[in-house]
Amino acid sequence: MQFTKAEEYGMLGVLYLSEKKLGSITPLSEIAEAKGIPEKFLAKIFQSLSRATIVRSHRGVRGGFSLAKDPKEISVKEVLESIHGPYHLIKCTNNTEICDKSNFCSLRELLSIAERKLVQIFEDHTLADLVKWQKNKMIAI
């Protein structure tokens, strides 16, 4: 399993906003430059994040984006699923009709267990957790 570029960039973008004071508006260009992300690609990702009410879009001269909620209230799962949709390691874990072996496939069983645990970890951790880990890592260096 590997994150898509959209998921990686989306996470980096919301983490950047999470480090700011709640409610502060940050231009998309600042986020893109700080994280080394193509601005046009980030704009598309932030449209999805905005529709999912993870970020709030602000128009005008002082426009940009802010988090829609406190980072403690936004799970990693919410961010990833707003960009990519529900998380599945393989297609047959949520749709057994696509495979004629799904009734007896031990690989499917194993991956279903792994998927549930991974999604639970994403659900159990918030943006605030990741920011805290990042700050602790920076202090250690």
Image: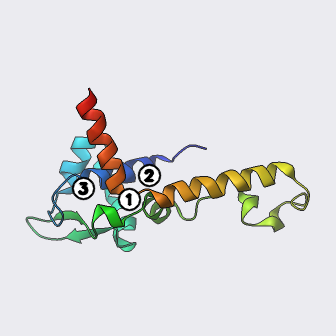
Q: Is residue 24 above or below residue 12?
A: below
Q: Is residue 106 above or below residue 103?
A: above
- Name the residue located 42 percent from the left edge and 62 percent from the top edge: 75
Tell me the quarter of the picture where residue 88 sits: bottom right
Q: Are marks 3 and 1 in contact (CB under 8 Å)?
A: no
Tell me the quarter of the picture where residue 74 sits: bottom left
Residue 125 drawn at (x, y percent): 43, 56
Numbered circle sitting on residue 6: 2
Q: Nearer the viewer, mark 3 or mark 1?
A: 3
Nearest to N terminus: mark 2 or mark 1: 2
- Tell me if mark 3 has few (under 14), some (14-19) or many (20+) residues whose alpha carbon lies within 10 angstroms of its own: many
What is the CA distance from the residue labelled 3 to the residue labelled 1?
14 Å
Q: Amino acid at mark 1?
A: Ile
- Name the residue located 32 percent from the left edge and 62 percent from the top edge: 72
Q: Return the residue nearer the eye: 115 or 87.
A: 115
Label 1 secondary element: helix
Q: Are marks 2 and 1 in contact (CB under 8 Å)?
A: yes
User: Is any atom of residue 89 visible in this view?
Assistant: no
Residue 129 drawn at (x, y percent): 35, 52
Numbered circle sitting on residue 45: 1
Residue with the mark numbered 3: 17
Tell me the quarter of the picture where residue 35 sits: top left
Q: Return the residue nearer the eye: 5 or 103.
A: 103
- Tell me if mark 2 has few (under 14), some (14-19) or many (20+) residues whose alpha carbon lies within 10 angstroms of its own: some
